[in-house]
């Protein structure tokens, strides 16, 4: 797999050159915890997105930087939609689905 040129976000995610020109070299001023919990809830992702938007000056600016629609960002923040792969990439996250036996 060829390495893409661009900005490396949290978790080593490589973002496009367009995003790298708009996002600061350290994605957001709010520090991430020293140890990121292995699993996060949807509410945790929304909190991370909300902080990211605040750090960049608002939902619209963050959406433009991440090459996502402002409406989609607003829908995720309002709980109407789940964060997709591109949003997770821009936040330096990955979506992982797990299953386990009942009663475990």
Image (cartoon, grey):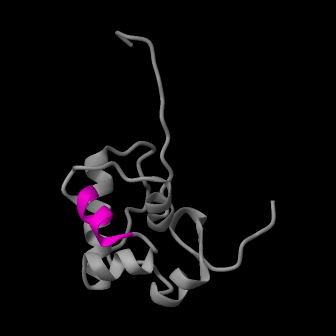
* Residue at the outermost bottom position: 21
Residue 61, placed above or below residue 70 = below
**Image coordinates for residue 100, horizontal then vertical, percent:** 45, 18
* Residue at the outermost top position: 103
* Residue at the outermost left position: 78
Q: Residue at x 43, y 54 (%)?
A: 36
**Image coordinates for residue 16, horizontal then vertical, percent:** 59, 77
Chief SS of the magenta region:
helix
Camera-side residue of 80 and 3: 80
Residue 26, placed above or below residue 73 = below
Q: Residue 47's quadrant in the figure?
A: bottom left
**Image coordinates for residue 56, horizontal then vertical, percent:** 32, 83
Say if the magenta span includes residue 75.
yes
Say if the magenta span includes residue 55.
no
- Which quadrant does the N terminus fall into? bottom right
Residue 56, placed above or below residue 12 = below
Q: Residue at x 36, y 45 (%)?
A: 40
- In this rendering, the count of numbered labels is 0
Camera-side residue of 102 and 63: 63
**Image coordinates for residue 26, horizontal then vertical, percent:** 47, 82
- Which quadrant does the C terminus fall into? top left
The residue stretch that appears in magenta: 69-76
Q: Residue at x 24, y 64 (%)?
A: 74
């Amino acid at each position: 797999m060829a390495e893409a040129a661009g900005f490396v976000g949290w978790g080593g995610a490589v973002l496009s050159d367009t995003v790298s020109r708009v996002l600061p070299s350290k994605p957001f001023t709010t520090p991430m915890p020293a140890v990121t919990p292995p699993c996060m809830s949807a509410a945790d992702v929304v909190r991370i997105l909300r902080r990211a938007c605040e750090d960049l000056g608002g939902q619209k600016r963050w959406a433009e930087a991440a090459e996502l629609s402002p409406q989609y960002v607003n829908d995720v923040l309002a709980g109407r939609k789940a964060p997709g792969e591109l949003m997770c990439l821009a936040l330096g996250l990955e979506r992982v689905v797990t299953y386990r036996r009942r009663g475990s």
